[in-house]
Amino acid sequence: MTDSQHVEGPRGTRAEDFDALMQLLNDVFRQHSRTMAQEHGYIYCLDNAEYLRIVLCDGRPVSHFGTKLWEIEILGMPLLMASIGGVCTHADFRGKGFATLLLKDAEALFRRRGVDIVLVSGGRGLYQTNGYAPFGRCCIFELDQHFTELLQEGSFRIREYSGKDFAALGRIYEGEKTRYRRPMDEMKKLVAGRLARPEPDRFVIVSREGLDLAWFVVSTGVDGKTPKLWEYAGDRAAVLAGLAAFMRTSNMGPVTAWVPAHDSALVARFQSLGLACRMESIPEHTVKILDFRSFMEKMRPLFRERVGETLLAGIRFENSGAGGVIHGKDGTVALADPHLVAKVVFGSPTSEEAAVTGAATGDVREFLTSVFPLPFVSAGMNYV
C-alpha cells in the first residue's frame, strides 16, 4: 500500500463490489474449491450486503468482516444475535489495523440495529482484547468402534437426507427450547450450504415405526480432520442410536461429539455407556453481550420462572463501563468486564464465575445461583 492509493470504508458491500469480495474470500479460505458463496449463500448475498463490512483500496475490497443477524430463542426468550466470521485481509494490506476498524464499525451497526449478543467463530486476540470471551460448557466425547458396539438399538431406522425430508428437519428442530428461528427459505439455504462444502456434510434422519424422531449432521470440515457431530435435534435416544448405526454402516471411523453441558439428556446417555467426557468452552467461538442491562431485562420472564416474582422484584440491572452490575435489596455484584459477564451468564468449564457467586450475599446470591448459567445456541448450520 502506498500513499497514492485511495482507501475507502468501512462500509457495507455494494453490488459492484460483490465479485471482487468473493475472490478475496476464496483466495483466503477456499483456494481450491472456490465455494464460499455456495457454502454460505445465506450470508454472501445481496440481501445481506449491508452486513458484509469491507475496506477498499482503489475500489477493490482488501479487508472483510462478515456478519449476519439472526433471531434466536434462549428457553423461549426471543433475542437478536449477530454472528461474525469470514474475517480476512489481503496479504498485502495486513498489519494496518483494518480488522480492528471493521470490528468497531460492525459493533456500531449492531447497536443501531438493537443486537443483544454477538457470536464470533473464532477466538484470536483481536476478539478477546475487544471483550469477546470463551464461554459455556461443552462435553466432548470421542466416539469410536467401541461406542458402536456398546449401542446397538435395533428399533431405530436411519436414512440420509434427501429433498423430500426437508419438512421433517424443520418440524423436529422446532421442538428445541434454545434455537435459531429458521424460516423455511432460510433453512433451505442453510442445508444447501452444508451440502455444497468440498466435503459435504452428512444429514441423517432417525425414525422408529415410520415416525421421524430426530436428525443429526456429521461434518468432516474442509481440513479433513476427525468428523464432528455438528448439529442435532429431536429425541435424544434416537440421536444416540442413530449416530451409532450411522457410524457402523458408513465406515466413517471415529467421530467427535460436541454436546452442550446444558443438554443433560444427551450427556447422561453418553455417560451411561461409560464414555469419558472432556469439558471445554464452546469450541471455536467467543461471545459478547453488547448491552448488559438490556439483555437482562429481556430475560426477566425466564428469571421470574426460576426465582419467583417476590425475589425478582428486588433485583435490578445496570450497565457499568463495558460490564454490568446486579443490585439487590441486600447486596450488589459488579461484573467488571464483558469477559466476566459472559462467564457468569453462560458458565465456563473453569467455573470462574463461582468467585462472583461466592462473593454475593442475600437475594443477589440466590438470584445468581438460581438463574445461571443459561444455555446458548449451537452455531451448527448457522455457522458464519
Image: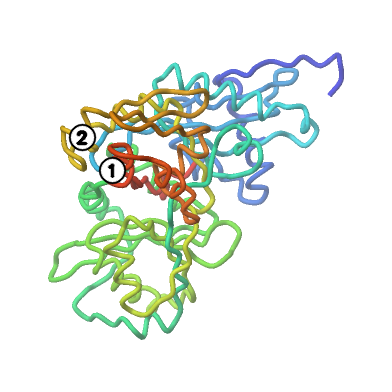
First of labels 1, 2 by sequence position: 2
**317 shown above or below 87:** above
Q: How is the image coloured?
A: rainbow
Residue that label 2 marks: 311
User: What's under tag 2, amino acid-wise?
Assistant: Leu
Can you tell which quarter of the image residue 364 is in? top left
**114 shown above or below 282:** above
Side (left or right) of 346 relative to 76: right
The structure residue drawn at horizontal position 75% and vertical position 18%, both measured from the top left corner, is 58
The N terminus, quarter of image: top right
Report the front residue among 25 and 260.
Answer: 260
The structure residue drawn at horizontal position 48% and vertical position 47%, both measured from the top left corner, is 135
The structure residue drawn at horizontal position 41% and vertical position 30%, both measured from the top left corner, is 69
Give residue 288's position: percent from left, percent from top. Answer: 48, 35
Give residue 95's position: percent from left, percent from top. Answer: 78, 32
Give the crowd class for mark 1: few <14, some 14-19, many >=20 residues within 10 Å: some
Give residue 327's position: percent from left, percent from top. Answer: 35, 28
Question: Does dot 1 land on a helix, a strand or a loop?
Answer: helix
Report the front residue among 213 and 334.
Answer: 334
Q: How many numbered circles does the render carry?
A: 2
Give residue 361's position: percent from left, percent from top. Answer: 35, 40
Name the mark on residue 366. 1
Are discs 1 and 2 less than 8 Å apart at CB?
yes
**92 shown above or below 173:** above
Report the front residue among 232 and 18.
Answer: 232
Side (left or right) of 317 relative to 355: left
